[in-house]
Image (tube, helix red, strand yellow):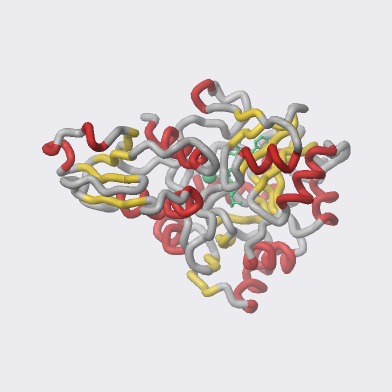
Amino acid sequence: MLRAATREAISAAAEIVRSGGLVAFPTETVYGLGANALDAFAAAKIFEAKARPTFDPLIVHIADDAMLRLVVDEPIPPLARRAMQRFWPGPLTLVLPKNSRVPDLITAGLSTVAVRIPAHRVAHALVMHAGVPIAAPSANPFGALSPTCAEHVQATLGDRVACILDDGPTPFGIESTILAFLPEPTILRPGAIAREAIEEALGCNVAVVSIATSTPSVPGQLPQHYAPRIPLRIVDPASVAPEDRRRAGLLAFRDDVPGYGASRILSPSGNLPEAAAQLFAHLHDLESSDIDRIDAQEIPEVGLGVAIMDRLRRASIKS
Ligand code: TXA
Ligand code: MG
């Protein structure tokens, strides 16, 4: 079930994908739950395994330009081309006009498809060996915390998936940034590539669709998402009374606060990429600690801090 991601394991997983099965695999962002993106029946198994509503579309992972032409149609906006040149392979997902080969189930009936070339050695080799684009959401039950190591997948979807390729913790630890062209370049989900870097590469301003305003106009913009099993609130821990700390866990940015029942520090040096990489692993640890709630400290909203705060806000919304 859990297999070290050797060449043999990757080709076995590719064979499972080709024959319509499900595999979990590491990407540079989080672990994905993949199936052949050109096979509606295979993709349906993803929705079933995750208990994911079918109005929430999937990201399609490709290996090269030939596969891109298979899943998208012209016109590809010139700014999208520029983003590809600068950020692919890598954690930037582009929303582009969909080719009719892509089953409607994958795109929730939209005329666009979300696509990226992953930079992770294992993800890239898996798509290459499979020879087909691979649709893959994060490998967690719908709405739960994203998995940043193979054990997270094993614990929640272990009995739903034929194979989990294990390559240790994922380097970015937070999902890809999703960029659409409406036609203005617009970030639909802040993620592993900061808005500032995209603006620099494109030479223009990039808008961000905020969850605060979301009635989900774009599918998948569901405000409640990435939630731990216990309540999470965003709070200044220094303002929490000591007797209220004992049964709570602290997710701190740089500095610990005494008196909490459990605590995790995202980055003692205040490094935002490091904090992003630790976010889900720490939340997984805290949700399985003997505490009743998580107090998350605010993170500066610059660079990757925007993606971190997006995940924390969604995690703090009660369903
Ligand atoms: O880093 C990642 O992106 C990871 C790894 C596995 O690649 N994948 C991931 O997938 O985070 P998932 O399913 O958790 O997020 C997919 C989201 C949807 O919820 C939706 O917001 C957006 O991608 N999406 C997909 N297709 C779209 C489309 N055609 N238009 C707008 N948004 C779309
Ligand atoms: Mg997800």
Which of these two is toward me, 187 or 205?
205
Q: How far across and down, in percent of the image, does residue 263 sit?
A: 26, 50
Residue 56 position (above or below residue 155) = above
Q: Residue furthest right?
A: 74
Left/right placement of residue 150 relative to residue 66 reads left
Number of labels in the image equals 0
Instruction: Say which quarter of the image contains residue 159.
Output: bottom left
Residue 130 position (above or below residue 193) = below
* Residue at (16% x, 46% y) in the render: 259
Left/right placement of residue 186 relative to residue 260 reads right
Q: How far across and down, in percent of the image, does residue 311 sit?
A: 46, 39
Which of these two is toward me, 70 or 18?
70
* Residue at (35% x, 48% y) in the render: 254
Residue 36 appears anywhere in the view: no
Q: How far across and down, in percent of the image, does residue 150 sit?
A: 47, 63
Quarter containing ligand 1? top right
Residue 317 appears anywhere in the view: yes
Quarter of the image containing the C terminus?
A: top left
Q: How far across and down, in percent of the image, does residue 314 sit?
A: 44, 34
Q: Residue furthest front?
A: 269
Which of these two is toward me, 232 or 279?
279
Instruction: Say which quarter of the image contains residue 278.
Output: bottom left
Left/right placement of residue 74 relative to residue 235 reads right
* Residue at (48% x, 43% y) in the render: 142
* Residue at (39% x, 30% y) in the render: 317
